[in-house]
Each structure stands twice: as structure tokens, then as C-alpha cells.
Amino acid sequence: MSLQSDINSLVESVDLELYDTTVVNEGEETIYRVSVISKTIENGKRKGVSLDACVELTHLISPLLDVTPPVSGDYRLEVGSPGIERKLTTLDHFKKSIGENIALLLGEKKKLRAKLSNVVGKSLTFLKEEEEIIIAFDDVQKAKTYFEW
């Protein structure tokens, strides 16, 4: 099994869903970031992830990384939620964001802000003022969720 699938199994064991794993450098420090989301959807919105769940998951993942380090050299493990406003870089990220507001940058600096209603294959369906807009995943240059205050 790969490190990613082992981490995914640990995340599933605490009834959460793996959103992403990334390695980031902040100053002199290397951080291995594990982002998780809740499986539970209440009132059309995904439930938040508690700090206790992140701590529990940190204790589960840490021994695994002692055996199979994700990077060479020193690093810090960080387990948390990707946040209410987060980047969408994969089709899986879009699938996990159905029902949320998305800000997109498409070709020729064209921007779109709309609610993601469906993902089928590589087609993303959005609703904007009751109009359905279908965009190919490959046409998306940048995307992120946004919260309307």
C-alpha cells in the first residue's frame, strides 16, 4: 500500500474524508499537511471538523510517518480542515464541493462565480441566477470555494 492510501485508511477510521495531502515550505520549516473534511452533510452543507478529531488523527498518523516519512529531512505534521475558502485543484476536490459557491478563472482572464451543482466525468455544472452553465474541468485555470457573508 502507498503512504497516501494508508493515511486515507486512518482518516476513514475516524469517520472523516481525506481532502488532500501537501508538502509546503514556510520560511525554514517544511510542513506535511493532511487536510480532512467531514462526511456528514447537514442542511445541504458539509459539517465542520472538530479540533479533537484533528488531534486524534494526528496521533494516528504520526507513528505511520515515523516508519514511512513523507519527505526527507525534518518536517512538521499538520492535520486540519482545508477551510471554508479553499483551492480546488482536482476533480475530486470539485466532487467534494458540490453545493458550494465557487470562484473560477477560465481562459482569457474570464471569471465566473457560481454554485457548483454537479460533476459528471470531466464536466462541471454550475448554477448562476437559475441558469445552468457547463464547463470542462480542463478549461479551469484556477478555482476556489468562497463564502458569501
Image (spheres, grey):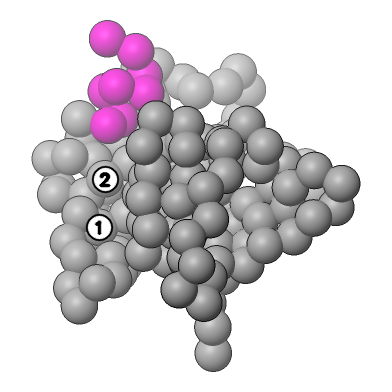
Query: Would residue 14 be seen by someone viewing this image from the given angle?
Result: yes
User: What element does badge 1 sit on?
Assistant: strand
Q: Is residue 87 left or right of residue 141?
A: left
Q: Position of residue 71 (x, y in %)?
A: 57, 22
**What amino acid type should be assigned to the residue bearing mark 2?**
Glu
26 w.r.t. 85: above or below = above
Q: Quadrant of residue 44?
A: bottom left
Q: Residue at x 32, y 54 (%)?
A: 37
Q: Is residue 142 magenta?
A: no
**What amino acid type should be assigned to the residue bearing mark 1?**
Ser
Q: Position of residue 46 (x, y in %)?
A: 28, 66
Q: Nearer the viewer, residue 78 or 131?
A: 131
Q: State the residue lying farthest toward the top.
A: 1
Question: What range of the chain is rendered magenta?
Answer: 1-8
Q: State the residue lying farthest toward the right.
A: 108
58 w.r.t. 4: above or below = below
Residue indicated by mark 1: 38
Q: State the residue lying farthest toward the front.
A: 131
Q: Nearer the viewer, residue 13 or 31?
A: 13
- Which class describes the residues within 10 Å of circle 2: few (<14), some (14-19), or many (20+)? some
Residue indicated by mark 2: 17
Say which mark, if any, is on residue 105: none
Q: Residue at x 27, y 9 (%)?
A: 1
Disc 2/disc 1 C-alpha distance (Å): 6 Å
Q: Residue at x 67, y 62 (%)?
A: 112
83 w.r.t. 96: above or below = below
Question: In which quadrant is the C terminus drawn?
Answer: bottom right
Number of marks in the rendered image: 2
User: What element does badge 2 sit on?
Assistant: strand
Q: Residue at x 18, y 73 (%)?
A: 42
Q: Position of residue 48 (x, y in %)?
A: 30, 69
- Residues at badges 2 and 1 in contact (C-beta under 8 Å)? yes
